[in-house]
Image: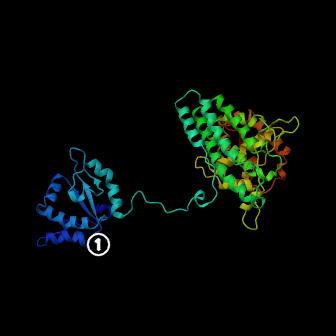
């Protein structure tokens, strides 16, 4: 212990011939320079202490008086050297309620040595964290309707892991609960437009719950049960999200600003779904959702145009400019909100930006598809995107090829270049420093160039 920097007072070397041993014992209790007293206890010590017998008895009388008089006294640390037949530590009565350290064997002493040293130095392994701020859902007066989706998800999770029959029904119940919650937040009566920005912001905060519930499902089932049925369920729920961002059929008089919260929610949730599928290596599912045609909601359909590509999930908001610092204007208020709401540790904001970079690549390579990558306004802080960096290797490029349906790096480079021209990317501003571009972020020059 001395070798660990602990100054030890011990009768063997601190008590000399002629000294008063009782005074020495009392000093261990009363001397403020003695910060801790270690009481090594086995059956012999405990018996003598309880019987107040011999020197141990006197010592125990001195210590017990101090222990009993100060309930929170942590100066005296019981060191257990023996356990009884029932597995209980052998301690004198006055120490039985105290927290002890196990030194009952050489192995135990070795395992618990660090614990003892930390106690003596006042540096415990686990310290209480500093008090944070109250969460916004406690401090705000805004309340959200309760969602039964959490219990539905628990039932779905159990059905997946136990391979229960009727998995489709469990999944449908869960997704219905998610969509019903989001639908209940759609504006159907004329709101107070003087505070519409605040209303949109509050509704986006409430809808984040649905975003996370849907993403939890995608992560779970894409990893545990990546079936064809799961892929079809993905397409189905995405079509339902399109309905949620559109005008309810019963509303005949409206302003498009009423639906901004749901437009941002759908845009955000779509990016998170793509990020979740990338995380679970679900490249077939990514190809499916990025190449499917989606049924356009009745209130959005015009003429014979009843289907749309994935660019239907794009969303923006002007009213969320209320998030901008005073005197400033945000390049993308929707992206700012998504960044602020990116509180998932399993899918951080960098993963969301990487997902949008993949969506942009698909927009470049899909005729008639348009996409403006709002979250990539913040990409200069993200550095390289791992999925695209790894795709320089041929085996990793095959993952990208499965998503895009384009078999070689050279073919993909041609398609992406044409997409740059079609979408007039050179006219887009305020994305990166001058040495960055979408092309370099996608690692285009290096894709599929290594064995």
**Residue 380 seen in the figure:** no
Q: Position of residue 226 (x, y in %)?
A: 62, 32
Farthest top residue? 165
Quadrant where the N terminus is found in the figure: bottom left
Quadrant where the C terminus is found in the figure: top right
Q: Name the residue under label 1.
A: 33
Rendered residue at 30%/51% (across/down): 110
Left or right, 303 with respect to 125, comes to right
Q: Where is residue 378 in the image (x, y as percent from the top left)?
A: 70, 55
Q: Position of residue 240 (x, y in %)?
A: 72, 39
Q: Where is residue 322 in the image (x, y as percent from the top left)?
A: 73, 61
Mark 1 Cα shell of 10 Å, populated few (<14), some (14-19), many (≥20): few
Q: Is the residue 306 above or below the residue 4 in the image? A: above
Q: Which of 341 and 295 is in front in this view?
A: 295
Q: Nearer the viewer, residue 382 or 306?
A: 306
Dot 1: element: loop
Q: How is the image coloured?
A: rainbow
Q: Is the residue 138 above or below the residue 18 in the image? A: above
């Amino acid at each position: 212990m001395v070798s660990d920097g602990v100054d030890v007072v011990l009768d063997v070397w601190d008590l000399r011939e002629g000294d008063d041993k009782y005074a020495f014992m009392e000093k261990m209790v009363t001397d403020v320079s003695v910060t801790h007293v270690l009481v090594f206890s086995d059956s012999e010590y405990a018996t003598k202490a309880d019987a107040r017998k011999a020197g141990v008895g006197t010592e125990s009388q001195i210590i017990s008086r101090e222990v009993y008089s100060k309930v929170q006294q942590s100066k005296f640390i019981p060191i257990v050297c023996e356990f009884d037949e029932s597995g209980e530590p052998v301690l004198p009565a006055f120490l039985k309620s105290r927290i002890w350290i196990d030194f009952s064997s050489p192995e135990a002493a070795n395992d618990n040595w660090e614990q003892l040293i930390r106690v003596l130095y006042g540096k415990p392994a686990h310290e209480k964290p500093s008090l944070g701020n109250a969460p916004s859902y406690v401090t705000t007066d805004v309340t959200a309707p309760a969602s039964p989706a959490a219990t539905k998800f628990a039932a779905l999770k159990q059905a997946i892991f136990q391979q229960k029959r009727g998995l489709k029904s469990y999944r449908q119940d869960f997704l219905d609960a998610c969509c019903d919650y989001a639908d209940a937040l759609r504006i159907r009566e004329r709101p107070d437009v003087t505070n519409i920005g605040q209303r949109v912001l509050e509704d986006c905060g409430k809808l984040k719950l649905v975003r996370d519930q849907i993403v939890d499902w995608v992560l779970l089932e894409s990893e545990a049960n990546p079936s064809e049925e799961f892929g079809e369920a993905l397409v189905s729920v995405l079509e339902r999200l399109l309905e949620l961002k559109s005008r309810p059929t019963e509303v005949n008089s409206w302003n498009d600003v009423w639906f901004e919260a749901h437009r941002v929610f759908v845009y955000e949730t779509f990016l998170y779904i793509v990020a979740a599928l990338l995380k679970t290596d679900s490249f077939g599912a990514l190809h499916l959702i990025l190449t499917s045609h989606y049924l356009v909601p009745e209130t959005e359909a015009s003429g014979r145009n009843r289907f749309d590509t994935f660019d239907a999930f794009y969303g923006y908001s002007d009213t969320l400019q209320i998030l901008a610092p005073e005197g400033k204007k945000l390049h993308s208020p929707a992206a700012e909100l998504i960044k602020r709401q990116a509180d998932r540790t399993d899918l951080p904001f960098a993963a969301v930006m990487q997902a949008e970079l993949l969506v942009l690549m698909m927009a470049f390579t899909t005729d008639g598809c348009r996409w403006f990558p709002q979250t990539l306004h913040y990409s200069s802080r993200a550095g390289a995107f791992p999925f695209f960096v790894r795709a320089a290797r041929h085996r990793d490029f095959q993952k990208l090829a499965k998503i895009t349906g384009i078999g070689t790096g050279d073919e993909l480079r041609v398609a992406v270049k044409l997409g740059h021209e079609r979408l007039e990317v050179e006219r887009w501003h305020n994305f990166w420093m001058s040495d960055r571009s979408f092309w370099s972020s996608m690692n285009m020059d290096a894709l599929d160039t290594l064995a």
